[in-house]
Amino acid sequence: MGVQRMDNVGIVVEDMDAAVAFFLELGLELEGRGEVQGLFADRCTGLDGVHCEIAMVRTPDGRSRLELAKYRNPAAITDGPRDRPHNIVGTHRVMFAVDDIEDTVARLRSHGGELVGEIARFEDSYLLCYLRGPEGIIVGLAEQLHGEA
């Protein structure tokens, strides 16, 4: 038996409200918020005394989700600056297809989003950029070009 689908990507955050607001502005939808704790959480994570707030956000098509987690116990660990470059081993980004990359970047700037580089054109296919969001999360944006020269 193989993988059925990718269920979600988990991201640990310190400011849950800011992270949720950022991803809602991007166009994701809030699926729900809640708290996770107990023996199952300890066993799954390999940590003791887990207590965290979670928020699940999903893409409008319902096929992709992010699970945002704010640890109350044990405390979240930060391992260096949040503005690390993209080529650090283990660093990841989450890529989203958008209709209008310029508009999306402008809207996300009001939620603390900052371009890592600049909006770049890949051949006649895509406009692409990396944007640093809350908690230093790198979000990729891709706007598919339709027959432009």
Image (cartoon, rainbow, N blue to C red):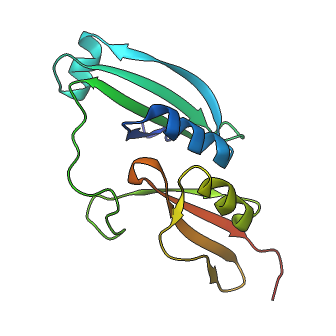
Q: Where, by quadrant of the figure, is residue 28 drawn? A: top right
Taking the spot 52% from the left edge, 21% from the top edge, the residue there is 33
Give the image location of residue 109, x and y in percent.
Answer: 60, 57
Which of 86 and 109 lies nearest the eye of the viewer? 109
Count of marks overlaid on the render: 0
Taking the spot 76% from the left edge, 74% from the top edge, the residue there is 145
Give the image location of residue 116, x and y in percent.
Answer: 47, 70
User: Quadrant where the N terminus lies?
Assistant: top left
Taking the spot 24% from the left edge, 28% from the top edge, the residue there is 45
In this rendering, position of residue 117 left or right of residue 60:
left
User: Quadrant where the C terminus lies?
Assistant: bottom right
In this rendering, position of residue 129 left or right of residue 67:
right
Which of 43 and 52 lies nearest the eye of the viewer? 52
Can residue 5 be seen from the camera position used here?
no
Give the image location of residue 122, x and y in percent.
Answer: 62, 82
Instruction: Classify 95 as above or below 85.
Output: above
Instruction: Classify 144 as above or below 53.
Output: below
Taking the spot 32% from the left edge, 71% from the top edge, the residue there is 87
Furthest residue toward right: 147
In this rendering, position of residue 73 left or right of residue 19:
left
In this rendering, position of residue 72 left or right of residue 97:
left
Furthest residue toward bottom: 149
Can residue 146 be seen from the camera position used here?
yes
Instruction: Classify 123 as above or below 92.
Output: below
Give the image location of residue 134, x and y in percent.
Answer: 46, 48
